[in-house]
Image (spheres, rainbow, N blue to C red):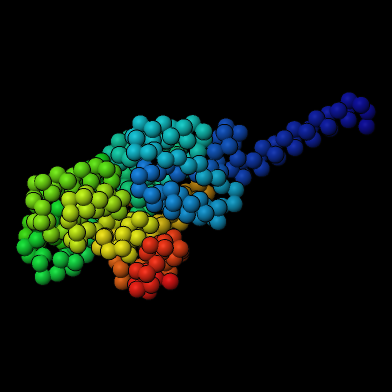
């Protein structure tokens, strides 16, 4: 073989190897133009006033993604209740080449436009906890049922006094579609079964605002004339209970939602009547599964559909002083030491929490 022929053979082999490597890259889903985003999954949560997002949802989602996809990386951001900030976070994920985003929106109505634009760019969206129009998948709990359970638990706590009771309702943020579902469910349980809804306002998912609204309700309805208080979540229940205590009002039913540590501790202490447990051991892993399956082009494995969107909706559970041990403790959401601080040790023992 002369020198010219040898050089031709080497050149042909080099071209063949390059083509083979390129084909392998395509088969593996890699693309030098995706900025490394092909194995990245975005997680955008709406706020940090409600402790569950940072303490429960985020770590459970990350754990489930790692279990399902060893090469996947979760890119996380919290919007701290700011729509503009969340939009910037959303746009940055897309700019960085992220192909699947699990989105729990601050404002679901505004987020629908973001989702539409993202899908035009080939980005898949998992609506996390709150429905967003146009999403590829939706994972949540049955939020209308959450409200129904909250209302039923208030009725049970009121007992025979329900028919004449004045009930105060402090609802969630009106920008949150779930808040509307909770509100609808509560009304379906309470309307016609209590004396009246004597005061109703949004607490905006903010304990401080909820406390201020509770103080306004006390002034409006009258001290000693409030039979029970509905709080859309545990964070606001804390502000509400503080306002009640400051006004010298004790021993009236107050319910919440999310089974936060502080909420469960108030149940143990006897200042909060119940909460609603929406297990992140269900929600976060299902959302992670959807996200990984969308990334890998697999079947979602959804349980059904909501407004045409493949979805899984989990059943919520009422937690009160009778079942703390068999719900949040048994599931490993909290250790007994998390709940039963020294000042609550005797009450925990009396409730069988161990």
Q: Quadrant of residue 201?
A: top left
Q: Residue 9's spot in the image, x, y percent? A: 84, 32
Q: Judge left or right: residue 134 versus residue 284.
A: left
At horizontal 37% and vertical 38% (from top left) the residue drawn is 80
Q: Looking at the figure, which quarter contains the N terminus?
A: top right
Image quadrant where one finds the C terminus: bottom left
Quick check: 31 above or below 223? above
Residue 56 horizontal/vertical position (percent): 43, 53
- Along the viewing direction, whichever of 300 and 275 lies nearer the viewer: 275
Looking at this view, is 27 or 30 the one in front?
A: 30
**Residue in view at x 20 percent, y 55 percent:** 230
Residue 294 x/y as whole percent: 47, 48
**Residue 164 lies in quadrant:** bottom left
Residue drawn at the location 59% of the way across and 52% of the way down: 70
Of 196 and 146, the residue lying toward us = 196
Query: What x and y, as percent, mark residue 222?
Result: 8, 51
């Amino acid at each position: 073989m002369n020198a010219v022929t040898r050089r031709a053979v080497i050149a042909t082999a080099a071209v063949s190897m390059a083509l083979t490597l390129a084909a392998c890259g395509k088969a593996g889903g890699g693309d030098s133009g995706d900025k490394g985003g092909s194995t990245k999954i975005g997680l955008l949560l709406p706020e940090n006033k409600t402790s569950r997002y940072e303490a429960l949802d985020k770590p459970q989602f990350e754990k489930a993604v790692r279990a399902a996809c060893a090469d996947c990386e979760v890119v996380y951001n919290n919007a701290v209740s700011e729509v503009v900030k969340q939009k910037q976070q959303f746009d940055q994920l897309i700019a960085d080449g992220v192909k699947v985003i699990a989105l729990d929106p601050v404002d679901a109505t505004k987020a629908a436009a973001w989702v539409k634009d993202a899908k035009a760019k080939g980005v898949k969206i998992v609506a996390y906890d709150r429905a967003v129009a146009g999403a590829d998948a939706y994972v949540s709990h049955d939020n209308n049922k959450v409200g129904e359970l909250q209302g039923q638990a208030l009725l049970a706590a009121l007992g025979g006094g329900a028919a004449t009771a004045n009930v105060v309702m402090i609802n969630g943020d009106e920008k949150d579609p779930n808040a509307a579902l909770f509100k609808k469910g509560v009304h379906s349980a309470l309307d016609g079964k209590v004396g009246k809804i004597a005061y109703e306002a949004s607490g905006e998912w903010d304990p401080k605002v909820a406390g201020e609204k509770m103080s306004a309700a006390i002034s409006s309805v009258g001290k000693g004339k409030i039979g029970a208080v509905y709080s859309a979540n545990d964070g606001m229940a804390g502000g509400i209970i503080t306002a009640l205590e400051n006004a010298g009002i004790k021993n009236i039913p107050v319910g919440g939602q999310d089974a936060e540590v502080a909420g469960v501790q108030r149940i143990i202490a006897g200042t909060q009547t119940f909460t609603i447990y929406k297990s992140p051991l269900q929600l976060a892993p299902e959302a992670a599964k959807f996200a990984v399956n969308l990334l890998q082009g697999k079947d979602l494995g959804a349980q059904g559909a909501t407004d045409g969107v493949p979805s899984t909706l989990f059943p919520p559970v009422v937690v009160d002083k009778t079942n703390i041990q068999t719900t949040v403790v048994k599931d490993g959401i909290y250790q007994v030491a998390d709940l039963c601080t020294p000042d609550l040790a005797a009450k925990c023992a009396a409730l069988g929490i161990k």
